[in-house]
Amino acid sequence: MSHSNSRRQFLTKSGLAAAALSLGIFSRASENRTNVREKKKELEVYKKGLALSTWNAGIIANNAALATMSTGGNATDMAEEGVKVIEADYSNLSVGLGGLPDREGHTTLDACIMNSIGQAGSVCFLEKIKHPVTVARMVMERTPHVMMVGEGAQQFALSQGMTLEDYESPEAVKAYKEWLVKSEYKPIINIENHDTIGMLTMDTNGDIAGSCTTSGLAFKMRGRVGDSPIIGAGLYIDNEIGGATGTGLGETVLRSCTAFLIVELMRQGASPQEACEEAIKRVEKINRFMKDDYQVGFLAVNKQGEVGAFGLRPGFNYALHKNGANQLIDAKYHLKK
Ligand code: ASP
């Protein structure tokens, strides 16, 4: 090819390129390529399923969630069955009937669940029922309501075939007796003393669901409910965008609608990590009048199966089951101590 020919071809091509660019054709083509790549990445995550949950106990819960998926369960089944294993572990002092009691010596349970079609169910201040998350799911699927509390929630659970369990954890009773001596609140929640479980799941369809279950703050005032069973505070799922759940001093989370905020930040383009960081900073800002130190930690997942995690202080960890591997990870944090 002569120099002038190749020069002409170059000019023609670059002319076409300029025209294409001005028409947005290239950007659309590369956008499509990115979309195809993203879709493929999504599909790889979907095939293997994903579960993400708070604290050390998350490892066992994630395994239970993934086992549920392998026998045909969807994201909601994963979210329920995953945390049920922790509710059934009576040695856990923060979840289920083994949980530390309120100031009057009664263990009261809070839980919620949200599925991929926008339905939600929640129970608060529930006593003597082994699986509050299952009652929350029944509220979601068998009633026109979202939230039931106390005696009414218990009556509903019984009407659905559940039974009352009068379990008293020896460890919890001992801790309560010790607490009675000084009767002080200790709002710091960390690996050493807390296990409220919040879980986010993604199934083989790429559908997202989540759950959260707790006995709440140890030695709380009778009737106190934290963020964990509150849709938008302790848990939020929007299957088009992603989900978020967390743990920590519930009052601070309630004031800042943290889970909903994280999902909304992701909707505006933030990655799950960026969204968690921004939301935790917001928690700190909104609660700056607080005199005591406290901990809050949040997790998020988006539709691509990318995850994020962030704590207000050091000490928040979580378990991530992704691409077939289940591991415990220390979250990054905002304040140095
Ligand atoms: N969020 C729970 C509550 O305030 C406690 C926790 O996560 O440890 O009840």
Image: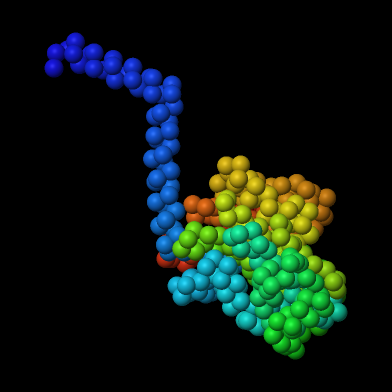
Q: Quadrant of the N terminus?
A: top left
**Residue 42 sits above or below residue 12 on the image:** below
Judge whether 250 appears above or below 21 on screen: below
Where residue 255 appears, x then y in whole percent? 78, 54
Residue beneath the point at 64% across and 50% down: 262
* Left or right: 45 as drawn, with respect to 145: left
Asked if residue 219 lies left or right of residue 330, the reply is: right
Eyeballing the image, is 218 above or below 239?
Answer: below
Q: Is residue 27 visible?
A: yes
Nearer to me, 121 or 312: 121
Q: Quadrant of residue 217?
A: bottom right
**Left or right of 95, for residue 24:** left
Residue appearing at x 43%, y 64% in the figure:
48
In front of the other: 249 or 179:
249
Image location (x, y in percent) of residue 60: 53, 74
Residue 290: percent from left, percent from top: 81, 54
Residue located at (53% from left, 60% from top): 207
Residue 214: percent from left, percent from top: 70, 71
